[in-house]
Image: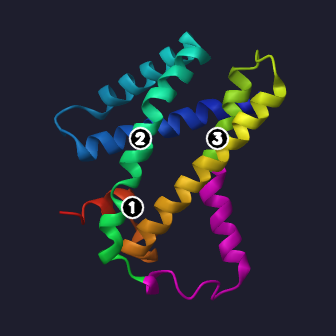
């Protein structure tokens, strides 16, 4: 029951966040509810058609998404300021551990939903290896993007902005 509740809450949070992002970036004439309904239907169809379709889609689209995420980083190098991340651990190790826990808890717990939904996998060793490899690459890309964003806009702007990566990308002209 707890995992099912977590899956519904996580899905609602992701749909709401993506709906707000589409509303802020895209045309404001379209109601946010329409964006959220389309995202919800897309999620339902991806679960309905199963792991094979989702896996094939990821093989095709995931490399493009990673390239799109990593392309702006060299253009940010002149904008980066090292003093935005220093002094590291000025207030001790507790704020660092708290920040890591808050930042990584949401994306990593999403992998538990895949375990819950797709439990009919034959080879558990291959499943664990693929899951750990995916979590490692996801955390690595997330670390690079968050570090780049903090180096560009600063820690205070990062925590005060609703969409900090989008705020940093708007600086590129």
> Mark 2 or 3 closer to N-term?
2
Q: Which residue is mark 2?
A: 65
Q: Residue at x 36, y 23 (%)?
A: 38
Q: From what the image shows, is residue 74 above or below residue 166? A: below
- The residue that mark 1 highlights is 164
Query: Per the image, is 102 magenta?
Result: yes
> Where does residue 129 sit, x and y in percent of width and height?
76, 36
**Residue 44 drawn in magenta:** no
Q: CA distance from mark 1 to mark 2?
A: 18 Å
Q: Are marks 2 and 3 in contact (CB under 8 Å)?
A: no
State the colouring used for the structure image.
rainbow
Residue shown at 58% from the left, 37% from the top: 10
Q: Nearer the viewer, residue 69 or 38?
A: 69
In which quadrant of the rendered image does the N terminus lie? top right
Task: Determine which quarter of the picture holds residue 143.
Answer: bottom right
Q: Which mark is on residue 150?
A: none
Residue under numbered circle 3: 134
Location of residue 45 in the rendering, given as x and y in whole percent from the top left corner: 48, 14
Q: Secondary structure at mark 2?
A: helix
Upstream in the sequence, badge 1 or badge 3?
3
């Amino acid at each position: 029951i707890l995992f099912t509740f977590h899956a519904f809450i996580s899905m609602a949070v992701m749909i709401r966040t993506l709906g707000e992002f589409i509303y802020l970036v895209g045309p404001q004439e379209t109601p946010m509810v329409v964006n959220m309904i389309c995202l919800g239907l897309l999620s339902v169809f991806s679960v309905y058609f199963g792991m094979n379709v989702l896996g094939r889609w990821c093989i095709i689209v995931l490399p493009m998404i990673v390239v799109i995420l990593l392309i702006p980083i060299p253009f940010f190098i002149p904008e980066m300021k090292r003093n935005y991340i220093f002094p590291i651990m000025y207030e001790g190790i507790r704020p660092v551990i708290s920040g890591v826990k808050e930042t990584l808890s949401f994306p990593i717990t999403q992998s538990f939903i895949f375990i819950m939904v797709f439990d009919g996998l034959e080879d558990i060793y291959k499943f664990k290896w693929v899951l750990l490899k995916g979590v490692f690459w996801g955390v690595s890309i997330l670390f690079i993007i968050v570090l780049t964003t903090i180096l560009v806009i600063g820690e205070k702007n990062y925590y005060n902005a609703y969409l900090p990566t989008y705020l940093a990308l708007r600086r590129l002209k």
